[in-house]
Image (tube, rainbow, N blue to C red):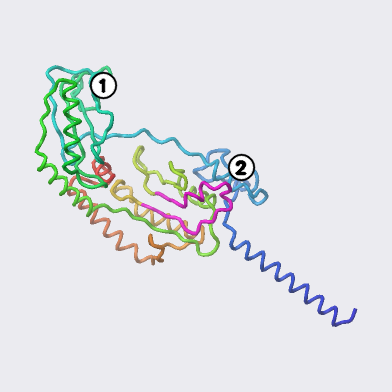
Amino acid sequence: MSTLQLSLSILGALVLALIVAYNAWTTRRHTPRRAQDEAHGGRREPGFAAGAMPPADPLDDPAADAQAARQWPVPALPPERRYGLDPLIDVIAPLQPEHPVSGAAALAALPPTRRAGSKPFAIEGLNQTTQQWETPAPGQRYQSFQAGVQLTNRMGALNEIEFSEFVVKTQAFADAINAAPDFPDMLHEVARARELDQFASEHDAQLTFMLRAREAAWSPGYVQQNAARLGFVPGAMPGRLVLPASQPGAPPMLTLSYDTQAALADDPDQSALRDISLGLDVAQIDRTEQAFARLRDVAAALCEAMDGALCDQHGQPLPAMAMEPIAADLERLYDQLDGRDLSAGSALARRLFS
């Protein structure tokens, strides 16, 4: 073999090696990042139950990420809490029976649905023993009742049709327990509902930010693993994680969500996420939680860990300085809610902004 032929052979081999290396780099760059098994380092991040992660190294087992996504435990939902009627946000109609009514009789007379149109509807009884208003319960006796329907929620203000449905349901209950209802004036209550709805619309802050991948996409397991390090746990819906508030039973402080189809894919390891969303429902969270400050910290940590960029809900990049005016606006919003006795995170605020 001549020197020229040998040189050409070596050059061809080098070119071939470069092509193979480039293709491998390109494939790796466009392959979604997968969760890593950190058990080998003696460290397991919070949010994963013992044994929840598959024992195999995900670098040796391509299905490890899919298993991680499916085996991440979903916590049981807390029991639904219902808050008492309040004249600040409810239309209330007193009902006075001729004689005390047993809890069993009251329960039997309750309407089958707890809504009047799109508004929550409730009936409470004044417990003869405790003298406390409560939802009727077996084994108790009640000397008075009150029916209520919420003035407004995120579906809009109470209207005349919904008020009429409230009257019909209340009257049926009153007839069943032999009570006389005292209904407030419909026009006055509908006007009050519209005024409260106007206030609520002007002070309903639901913030959403997007985290977008700069280079390689993310797999669901990779997102879950990084979010778990910051305290997130699985939510009730696929593709939804939540950061619990410090107060037991309170709504989650923050939500992290991504494409539901990716979360439900047969092989989530192959699902490529280019962006995820971080959300904060301001009125649902107590001011003392400093939820927006926590959101900023979480966003910064995830962007750094996953090589992402913080954007607004439309995907436009957000500079760090853009967050300061938002923080100032939120402080004014908290003050205005406090002044209306609808402090963020209070029982009334959670009902109103729902």
Number of numbered discs: 2
- Front position in the image: 262 or 50: 262
Gap between marks 2 and 1 measured at Cα: 51 Å
Magenta highlight range: 255-279
Q: Earlier in the sequence, mark 2 or mark 1?
A: 2
In the image, 173 versus 267, the foreground residue is 173
Residue at (61%, 47%) from the top-left corner?
64
- Which corner quadrant holds the N terminus? bottom right
Quadrant of res 142: top left
- Which residue, as the protein is rendered here, is positioned at the far right? 1
Q: Which residue is mark 1?
A: 108
Residue 195 in the image: state x and y as whole percent.
15, 49
The amino acid sitting under disc 1 is Ala
Residue at x 48%, y 50% (from the top left corner):
227
User: What's the residue at 74%, 71% (across, down)?
Assistant: 16
The C terminus lies in which quarter of the figure? top left
- Residue 146 colored magenta? no
Q: Is residue 96 left or right of residue 348?
A: left
Instruction: Please name the residue that numbered disc 2 is placed on.
Output: 54
Mark 1 crowd level (few <14, some 14–19, many ≥20, 10 Å Cα): few
- Image location of residue 115, percent across then percent down: 26, 36
- Is residue 79 positioned above or below 17 on the image? above
Quarter assignment of residue 209 = bottom left
Residue 244 vs 31, above or below: the answer is: above
Q: Residues within 10 Å of mark 2 (few under 14, many from 20)?
A: some
Residue 323 location in percent, x, y?
34, 62
The three-letter code of the residue at mark 2 reads: Pro
Element at label 1: helix
Picture coordinates of residue 224 (x, y %)?
Answer: 51, 49
Residue 273 counted in the magenta span? yes
Q: Quadrant of residue 95?
A: top left
